[in-house]
Amino acid sequence: MRRALLFALLFAGCEGPDFAPSSIVRSPRVIAAVATPAESTPGQDVRLSTVVASPDPVDHAVEWEIDLGVPALAAAAGQTLEGAPRVVRFEVVDGVARLPGEETRAAMDALLAAIDDAPLGTPEGVVRYVYETVGLTLLARFTLRVNGEIAMEGFKRIALSPAPSRLTNPPPPRFRVGEAWLSARSGEPTVCAPEGDVPRVAPGETVTLSPEPDEDWLETFPALDLEGQVITGREDAYYSWFSTAGGFGFETTRPPGRDTEWTAPMEPGEVPIWLVVRDGHLGASACLGMIRVE
C-alpha cells in the first residue's frame, strides 16, 4: 500500500521532464504541449496545443494517442488490474488535438465498474481512493512527423479528477528583453508581440531576459503523503528558454532567480526566442517572440 501510494504521489504530482534538454534548437522538435483544461473531469473534452520549434519552416504534423483501458487507468494509481488496452487517437484540427469527453467518460465508467466497492486494502480499493482524492494522471503520447518521417516521440500528462474545482494553466507568457517587453496576453496566446519597440541587440551582445515576476497564478492542489494521507501541495514556477541561435546563461530558471542572459549571435537578423512557463504540476503556457540582431 505504501509503495503504491508513493508511486501514485510521484506520478500524479509532477509534470514530466523537459521535452528536450538543449535550449538551442537545431532541428524540429516539440518544446511544449498545453492541455486545455489543465485538469479535466471525465466527460469533458481535452485539447492539446503543441509548440513545435524549428530553425526553418517545415511541413510537420503531431499525432496524439492515449491508452484509456482499465490497466492503464489502474497503473496511474500504482496498481495492476486485468483488462485490455484501449488506445484512443486524438482528433487533430488546425494543429489542435482533441480527446472527446465521451471517451474519458466511457473509460471511467469501465474502471468504476471493475473496482466496484472493493475495500481500501485491495488494488481496486487503492485505485478508487487515489481517483477520489487526487485524481488519475495518464500519459498521452505524441509523434512528431516532419515531411512524413518520425522526428520525435514523447508524452504529456493528462489529469482526470472528480473534484468540483480544477487546476488551470499559467497565463500566456510575458517577458522583458533588456528594457523592451514582449507579451502574449493581449492577442494570440502563443505569440509574444512587442508592447512597444521591437527588442534590438547588437551582434555578440549579452542581454538579460526577465519573465513577468507576478506569479499570483500559482495554485495549490491535493496530494498524498507516504502514509496515504491527503496533504496540500503548491505549484512552483519554471521558465524554460529556447532559441535557434546565440546562447543562454541558464536554460531553465525559477524564483527567485527568474532571469537568464542571452548572448546574441554574430550574424544580424531576426532571432526567435521561445519561453515555456510551467507550474511544476500539470499546467503550462508558451509563446514565441522575436529579437532583432543589428
Image (cartoon, helix red, strand yellow):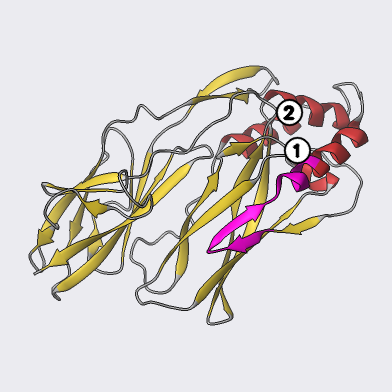
- The reply to whether residue 2 is visible in this rendering is no
Residue 273, percent from left and from top: 28, 59
- The reply to whether residue 253 is visible in this rendering is yes
Residue 70, percent from left and from top: 84, 44
Residue at 26%, 38% (x, y): give it. Answer: 212
Q: Is residue 192 left or right of residue 31?
A: left
Q: In this view, does 104 lie above or below 188?
A: above
Residue at 10%, 46% (x, y): give it. Answer: 179
Q: Quadrant location of the N terminus?
A: top right
Disc 1 packing (10 Å; few <14; some 14–19; many ≥20): many
Residue at 13%, 73% (x, y): give it. Answer: 266
Q: In this view, does 201 lie above or below 235?
A: below
Q: In this view, does 59 lie to the left or right of 254?
A: right
Q: In which quarter of the image is residue 38?
A: top right
Q: Which amino acid does label 1 sit on?
A: Gly
Q: Is residue 62 above or below residue 80?
A: below
Q: Distance between the residues labelled 2 and 1?
A: 9 Å
Q: Which amino acid does label 2 sit on?
A: Val
Residue 247, percent from left and from top: 24, 62
Q: Do the residues labelled 2 and 1 touch (CB within 8 Å)?
A: yes
Residue at image mark 1? 78
Q: In this view, does 279 lie to the left or right of 193?
A: right
Residue at image mark 2? 130
Q: Quadrant location of the C terminus?
A: bottom left
Residue 152, percent from left and from top: 55, 69
94 is within the stretch colored magenta:
yes
Q: Magenta part of the protein: which range? A: 90-105
Q: Is residue 157 above or below residue 280?
A: below
Residue at 13%, 67% (x, y): give it. Answer: 293
